[in-house]
Image: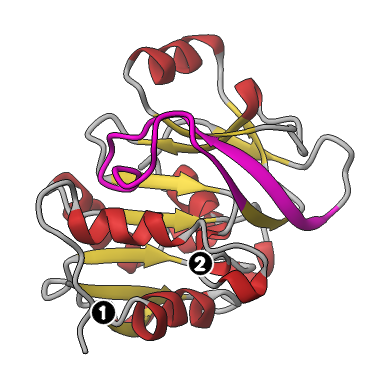
Amino acid sequence: MKFAVIVFPGSNCDHDMYHAVKDVLKMEADLVWFEDCHLENYDAILLPGGFSYGDYLRSGAIAAASNCLQQIRTHAAEGKPILGVCNGFQILLEAGLLPGAMLPNQHLAFMCHQEKLSVANHTSMFTNQYEKNEIVQFPIAHGEGNYFCDGVTLNQLKQNNQIAFTYQNNPNGSAADIAGILNKQGNVLGMMPHPERAVEALLGSDDGLKVFQSMIMNGRVPYVANV
């Protein structure tokens, strides 16, 4: 399986994402500059965290208007798995690939620490290696991670099983404790916590490995690392 890690001006978690896939999981991966975005030969697309375009206008808004996102929309419609983490989640929201919006944290402070999450949907292509309601620990690092949507959208997310992860102790005020959501088709996941920073026990947790292993296995074939 071959992964594309999209790099925008201001991305700063791109190498973390690349390391998780390439060095830890031993999969093929490339860092893809947003202006050189040719994604036809990739099996999955990763949008990393950071501060694309310095978070000017709104977090993720300028990146969402790029030609690269036009390509990603096409691949999303075709069912290709797309994972957006932190700023990547914000970009997916701004691009309309996921519903809702991101607000500043409830207490208006940047947060950077470990958080416990519950796996709310363990059957998606991003979570099929977790148990139902499994408790995992990922780090967060954001100032605008307060997920918001209206009541109608929230009911739809619940009814369609689109809530992938929830916070155990909601750190930012997100609606319904939401830490990550899927699109209705199930092939786009946006989440604020960082699974790519939780792939080695030495760093505090390797619970994030299963996000990438789930993508690789996708419920069909065993994960075997390239050696």
Residue type, label 1: Met
The vertical placement of 88 against 9, above or below, is above
Can residue 70 be seen?
Answer: no
Question: Which of these two is toward me, 38 or 196?
Answer: 196
Residue in front for this viewpoint, 162 or 221: 221
Instruction: State how many labels appear.
Output: 2
Residue lying at 44% horizontally and 75% vertically, measured from the top left: 20
Q: Nearer the viewer, residue 111 or 54?
A: 111
Give the residue at x 22% y 50%. 76
The residue drawn where x is 25% and y is 45% is 125
- How is the rendered protein coloured? secondary structure
Expressed as whole percent of the image width and height from the top left, the position of residue 31 reads 37, 84
Residue 176 located left or right of residue 225: right
User: What's the distance in space between the residues labelled 1 and 2, CA to CA?
Assistant: 14 Å
Residue pointed to by mark 1: 27
The quarter holding residue 124 reads top left
Q: Please give the range of residues in magenta.
A: 110-137
Q: Position of residue 98 (x, y in %)?
A: 40, 38
Q: Is residue 123 magenta?
A: yes
